[in-house]
Amino acid sequence: MLYLSTRGHPDRKHFCDILLEGLAPDGGLYLPERYPQIDDAQLTQLRKAYHEQGYAELAFQILQLFIDDIPAADLHALCAKTYTAEVFGTGEIVPLRHLEDGLWLEALSNGPTLAFKDMAMQLLGNLFEYELARRGETLNILGATSGDTGSAAEYAMKGKQGVRVFMTSPHGRMSPFQQAQMFSLQDENIHNIAIEGVFDDCQDIVKAVSNDLDFKRQYKIGTVNSINWARLLAQVVYYFAGYVQATETNAERVSFTVPSGNFGNVCAGHVARSMGLPIDKLVVATNENDVLDEFFRTGVYRVRSSADTHETSSPSMDISKASNFERFVFDLLGRDAAQTRALFGDALSKQGRFDLGQDPRFADAAARYGFESGMSTHADRLATIRDTFQRHGVTIDTHTADGVKVAREHRGDGTVPMIVLETALPIKFAETIQEALGHSPERPAKFDGIEDLPKRVQVMPADVQQVKAYIVQNCK
Ligand SMILES: *Cc1c(COP(=O)(O)O)cnc(C)c1O
């Protein structure tokens, strides 16, 4: 299995080469040359693997189709080490829970940081450690976070050989729970840098450091952002796990509704569907930052300015552009790399938008790829959290609420099960739950008193030189 760039670079690469890389050299995103196809017998085999041997075995069997440069026994061991009941709370790893007529919740957020990003990041941590050891290399991960990504990365990389994490975050702007989660880590290879500024300042610092190519090379700077193919691949597995839990035969189909920001989660659903998993609809749910909903309704993809990007109560979906979206558009255009380059390279940088509304390939996109979309506002979120609690006694987080709201509008006549991906636990967004329900969400026992633990964090002005100096000093 070889990987190509969505912008047409001639190189073809193996999985482990792109594992440690971000963008392709031409600015494109990596995708497999073709999606492996699952036939009926294989799907039956995967169904058995999940039910009889568990999620780790399912993960191994799917990953193996995409990875030909890690020996099977090693890949098997990496999956077994990653997807354990100890780390993810249950033996099912991603249990499916019935909510109401035709609607199910797939729990993806029982990992260490209580958000679905753990599903991929925990595997990434083990893959990085394995591959760096094999190459005799080290890596310093530099990132910017406003919450979920940074903590998922830190919990995945803590204590790993060959990896250090330098995570910048806007000082005093994350929720107390999120700060406590990250800053209470005492592992020597984890460095929290609280920047006196906003999230954009943190991102600018990461960009500035990464653009200093000498520094980047000398200090082996890397990233773990959502365009990383390995993260996307790890996410493909739970679409299969949701499907085999919701159905008894391969003749049945299911639909998924996915709370979306950077289009990473739902893009994994697109890959699963392209492999032949019987998915009917993939419903993209956005918050007020409706870049993706606008595209699926009109064919217009319009990047928002930062002034035009709303701060919402589902903050992990507050995006100005959807960084994984190029992967889907490449497929939509019949894998025309020149046109993908023209749209994402030229049109976006010059006009900040492109319009496929008149393109016949957009017109039948819903039929061919199953995509539908909808959006949800703060008022919708509150109403959905309240209603779901009152009718079912279930508390859902704000992002999942965006999903449930949109799923209810798209479930059709209820003959095809609609699975909503639950992307975080409510305790991470306690303020909005309090606003909706008048009481705080339940806190898992292992997080009792987390805010009182000693904190390991370095506060710094928004100054690239100081961040660089800190990295140099801590790379010895
Ligand atoms: C990251 C995140 C999302 C958005 O996922 P994408 O892959 O960016 O679409 C949704 N909900 C939560 C809780 C998240 O952390």
Image (tube, grey):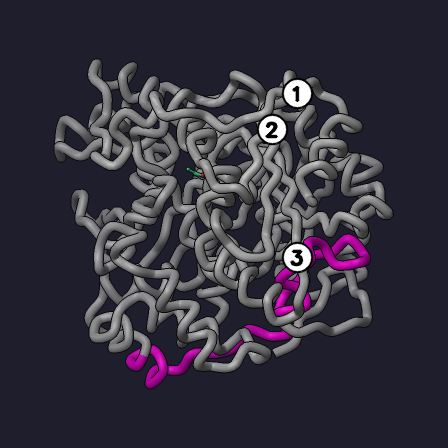
Dot 2 surroundings within 10 Å: few (below 14), some, or many (20 or more)?
many
- Quarter of the image where one finds residue 269: bottom left
* Cα–Cα span, label 2 and label 1: 7 Å
Total marks placed: 3
Residue found 28% across the figure and 25% down from its top: 449
- Badge 1 marks a residue whose secondary structure is strand
Q: Quadrant of residue 390?
A: top left
The C terminus sits in image quarter: top right
- In this view, 125 is above or below 17: above
Q: Quadrant of the N terminus?
A: bottom right
Q: Give how far across and how far down residue 377 sits, in percent.
A: 42, 24
Q: Amino acid at mark 2?
A: Ile
Could you give the CA–CA distance between mark 1 and mark 3, rounded to whole angstroms?
A: 25 Å
**Secondary element type, mark 3:** loop
Q: Amino acid at mark 1?
A: Met
Q: Residue furthest bottom?
A: 41
Residue denoted by label 3: 138
Q: Residues within 10 Å of mark 3 (few under 14, many from 20)?
A: some
Q: Which residue is mark 1?
A: 460
Tell me, yes or no, whether the two marked residues, 2 and 1, touch with CB atoms within 8 Å.
yes
Residue 193: mark: 2
Report if residue 405 is visible in the image: yes
Q: Which mark is residue 445?
A: none
Tell me the kind of residue under disc 3: Thr
